[in-house]
Image: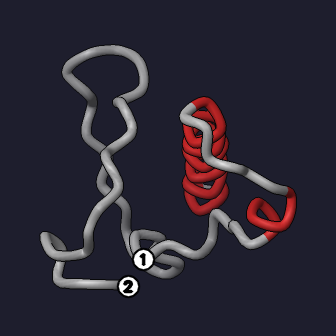
């Protein structure tokens, strides 16, 4: 059940990111969207435990700026 909640959350984040890219003038095409999957993320642990923290404020956090890959050790 938790896995499906994480997948839903990732889907909502991908949707928001696509909307933001389109609003910024990036050509978001159907072919590009077809390559996205809410399961292609390192942070989904299919067999382990999840720890959730209650946010300080209600609502969704803002999207992060695109990473250059340097802060987190490079490309994934």
Q: CA distance from mark 2 to mark 1?
A: 8 Å
Q: Relative to residue 70, is residue 14 depicted above or below?
A: above
Q: Residue at x 57, y 42 (%)?
A: 21
Q: Is residue 48 left or right of residue 25?
A: left
Quadrant of the frame with the C terminus: bottom left
Image quadrant in which you'd find residue 33: bottom right
Q: Residue at x 64, y 63 (%)?
A: 38
Assign a secondary structure to mark 1: loop
Q: Residue at x 35, y 30 (%)?
A: 61
Percent coordinates x, y for residue 57 in the rendering: 26, 16
N-terminal-most mark, 2 or 1: 1
Q: Relative to residue 40, is residue 30 depicted above or below?
A: above
Residue linked to disc 1: 42
Between 18 and 38, which is closer to the camera in this rendering? 18
Q: Is residue 38 left or right of residue 69?
A: right
Assign a secondary structure to mark 2: loop
Between 50 and 60, which is closer to the camera in this rendering? 60
Crowd tier of the residue under label 1, counting other residues whose Cα lies within 10 Å: few below 14, some 14–19, many 20 or above = few
Disc on res. 76: 2
Q: Is residue 50 left or right of residue 33?
A: left
Q: Residue at x 33, y 84 (%)?
A: 75
**Mark 2 touching mark 1, by CB under 8 A?**
yes
């Amino acid at each position: 059940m938790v896995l499906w909640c994480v997948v839903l959350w990732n889907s909502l984040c991908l949707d928001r990111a696509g909307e933001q890219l389109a609003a910024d003038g990036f050509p978001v095409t159907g072919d590009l969207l077809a390559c996205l999957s809410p399961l292609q993320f390192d942070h989904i642990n299919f067999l382990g435990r999840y720890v959730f923290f209650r946010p300080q404020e209600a609502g969704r956090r803002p999207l992060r700026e695109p990473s250059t890959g340097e802060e987190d050790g490079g490309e994934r």
